[in-house]
Image (spheres, coloured by chain):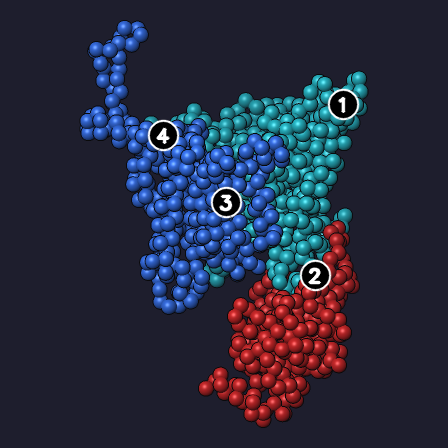
Amino acid sequence: MGILEVKDVGKRFGGLQALGDVNLSVKENSVHAIIGPNGAGKSTLLNCLVGKLIPDTGSVMFDGQSVLGRTPYEINQMGISRVFQTPEIFSDLTVLENMMIPCFAKRDGAFRMHAIENMMSEAEIVDKAEHMLEEMNMADKAGMHSASMSRGDKRRLEIAMCLAQEPRLLLLDEPTAGMARADTNNTIDLLKQISDERDITIAIIEHDMHVVFSLANRITVLAQGTPLVEDDPENIRGNPKVREAYLGETA
Amino acid sequence: MDALILQILNGLDKGSAYALIALGLTLIFGTLGVVNFAHGAIFMIGAFCAVTLSKILNLSYETIDPNQTDFLGNPLKVKTPYVESWFGPEIGASLIDWAVPLAIIFSIPIMLAVGYIMERGLIKHFYKREHADQILVTFGLAIVLQEIIKYFYGANPIQTPSPDALSGVANVGAVFGMDIVYPVWRIVYFCFAAVIIAAVFSFLQFTTFGMVVRAGMADRETVGLLGIDIDRRFTIMFGIAAAVAGLAGVMYTPINSPNYHMGMDFLVLSFVVVVVGGMGSLPGAVLAGFMLGILESFASMNAIKSLIPGIDQIIIYVVAIIILLTRPRGLMGRKGVMEE
Amino acid sequence: MLGLNKKDTSLMIVVIILTMFAPFILNPFPVDSAMAQFNAGYPDLMQRFVIFGIFAIGFNILFGLTGYLSFGHAAFLGIGSYSVVWMYKLLDYNVIYGLPLAVLTAGIFAVAIGYVSLRRSGIYFSILTLAFAQMSFNLAYSVLTPITNGETGLQVYNNDPQVLLGANEATSPHLFGIVMNNSFKLDVGAWQFTFNNGYYFCALVMLLVFYLSIRIFRSPFGLMLRAVKSNQNRLSYTGLNPRPYTLAAFVISGMYAGLAGGLMASMDPLAGAERMQWTASGEVVLMTILGGTGTLIGPVLGAGFIKYFENIFSKINDTILHQWFSFLPDGLEDAVVFIIHPFIGKGWHLTLGILFMLVVIFLPGGLVEGGQRIGKWIKSRGKSEDSDSGATTEPAE
């Protein structure tokens, strides 16, 4: 029994069957990659996991509880954090302020009316945020306006914000899309380090096979909205079905 | 039964004005993605085009008529409009009489120019800014336009009558064997609105230009990639939207004497109409315009007012709130327009 | 001090000094001088400065922090005024009963209106709030006449109960006997300074709510509101529910508006429906933008600026213009006066509209940003004077 169990999930947009009977089991503390050609339904699946979309059929269980019908923030509070394809951070705020928000969310829940206290005198939160930045080698950027950072740093900050919530499952949506090689390698190293050092499960949607095979210890291949195969990386490499699915696209 | 039909008719002329303004708002929003708070001011400028033309036609010179005397026995000064002396009294008089319909021709180039200047001079720079900024700058523009009109025309409503031939009442129910007396000009207004709406729709439906604009409304980026100069077409679209609102204003003058704040009054309601119809949906704007116009006139029936006091004042807003909460996209709104 | 950091403390102190010494600061010209018309140190105008300041501070908590643009805040202003006048009618002229009620009623209405409007965002939110405000305005004019007294406006009549009215009690608004209308006039040489009870009362209230707004801006709650404006998507994927945060901001700013409306009725015991019209909502938007959205002091500056120039510009007429430009040759003098004429007197709104457009186009940060830019420019100029090479490297902003 995995930490995330997707059973017979289907989603239809008008005449298009985006997902049909997807079954997926993500084991605790694994790095699970979901790959597939464009239009295979990877993003739709991800959106169904985090509450942005509600599947027409099937069930999604996280740690024994259904996530269906819950809003994104409720699902997040259950322990699923999401990293977006283009880094989603609070670009009007400073890096430290960005970091403090998930810390507050972890401590105070979805809403707390604390309108009179000074946020900077919440020592516990500030410490945690600063500590997290240090761990990410971003301590020197704490006072910086987050919009003025490089894309790689924004990605790093976004991951740090997700980790600050101590999630049990981290979902990444093509985290290296549009990145230069060096930034991609940095991100791979960072994710490796996270998965090694923390008690965390990572599910990653990725196009870049280099990233997938450097990180994943379990791979699901999606094609046309259904899982083609789920296996270990070594077996995926040689699988003719997978080749066909990809060749069909690249040829 | 007669009363019901009368109320529907009553709703139609107001609904026509709503629909025409909302149509322009939607065109601008759908094509340019701009929320234009100055659109009501365009409606007002149209109305004042009619006022201006009627003033120009009424320009007169004074002569002393020795045959007539005033009550003090002095020779009477007689004003003769220039047009009467140029074209002869009969043609001149009918020109003055038909000032409002004539203003249609007079106003089209003016409104197109107003639209063009507005888009090139101001709106263009706000395509990439936030909607809040667009609202704010067009709100400022609306204030400026309304104050300019106030400066030149004063704060009081200016009566601009319809032609004598169209100013009476007609028994429109006679055809159905009923007795429904209704002002002729309002019927004219409704027909006029119907023609304009039909023209805009067929223009968008049957011309290449319209096809490109519709494609642009659906997916601006792709159309731009096809090498079509979408910006220029959108500028023209803005001019057309301005002309539609302007014409709505021209023809509305006999129904409601124009004043400088009529634009703002209509704008608030037209925005509600657009939202109810669905942002970016042209049929939605027209449908919602007529629907709300008719609902409003039903709500002002005494029988209904005595049932729910004050309902005539708020019906449009109540409907808008209910629609927005139950069908966030409006009656006919498309997915993905103005959503988070 | 008082839980504020150093920068905020000095800001607070500056604001305290400015408001407390306003009767001096705003009356720099001797009474009989030609410039006396530019004096703003009379009670009515000073009261408006601070009351609209409160209105704008509150509006800024919503718009400045969360980015939700409400076009319906005037409704709360009107509700506040009605509440206070009703307390005059039922109890007595002591404002101590009406003001808390004004805040409370405005808050209750804000919960209801906000709960519905905040289900949508962006332009939909603006239009929903607009719809609610127009609805309130229309109702106040029509069916609610028993409560609002319709077009006449709500006021106190002789046959009102006023159950608490004592024998010797003041018959105009007062706070435990301190009558709002009363002023103390101080003559110093050619100058005259007016110290009005009502002004000082409003000023103290404003200082209190200004302090409160600094606290809100610096609180975790304020941080969340800024996060709502910055990226609502990220906020919900960070396990936070944006809606109660925005609703709380809406209610707080509605209560500020209610307080401002209540203070208006505390200065002048009247309440009319026109206070609820959407143009009044537009005015507070203008004030906030003009001053500087999302800044602490901006809204207060904006309110002061608009109310001051509204007053001054409306008073200037052609005769005054002719006096000013009398040094020019006759023809030129007439031409200049002719050009300026549309912008003064009743043309103030034209000037305001143009000013507002210019600010939105060129100076989105309002007066505060303008001040910062000038400050930077002076600094960079000072530097370039020190060393000539500095001028080429420093980009002029």
Please tell me whether mark 4 sits on a helix, a strand or a loop. loop
Do callouts 4 and 2 mark residues in contact (Cβ within 8 Å)? no
> Circle 3 sits on which residue?
B291
> Dividing the image into 4 quarters, which one contains the C terminus of chain B?
bottom right
> Circle 4 sits on which residue?
B167
In this view, the mark in front (4 or 2): 4
Q: Which chain is blue?
A: B
> Circle 2 sits on which residue?
C240
Instruction: Kindly report the distance in space between the C-alpha atoms of the residues bearing marks 4 and 1.
Output: 55 Å
Q: Amino acid at mark 1?
A: Gln
**Subunit bearing disc 1:** C
Instruction: Kindly report the distance in space between the C-alpha atoms of the residues bearing marks 4 and 2.
Output: 62 Å
Q: Which chain is cyan?
A: C
Badge 3: residue crowd in 10 Å (few <14, some 14–19, many ≥20): many
Do callouts 4 and 1 mark residues in contact (Cβ within 8 Å)? no
Q: Nearer the viewer, residue B142 or B31?
A: B31
Badge 4: residue crowd in 10 Å (few <14, some 14–19, many ≥20): some
**Subunit bearing disc 3:** B
In this view, the mark in front (3 or 2): 3
Please tell me whether mark 1 sits on a helix, a strand or a loop. loop
Asked whether, in this view, residue C287 is left or right of residue B243, the answer is right
Instruction: Kindly report the distance in space between the C-alpha atoms of the residues bearing marks 3 and 2.
Output: 40 Å
Q: Amino acid at mark 2?
A: Leu
Residue A102 visible in this rendered orientation of the protein? no
Q: Nearer the viewer, residue C191 or A249?
A: A249
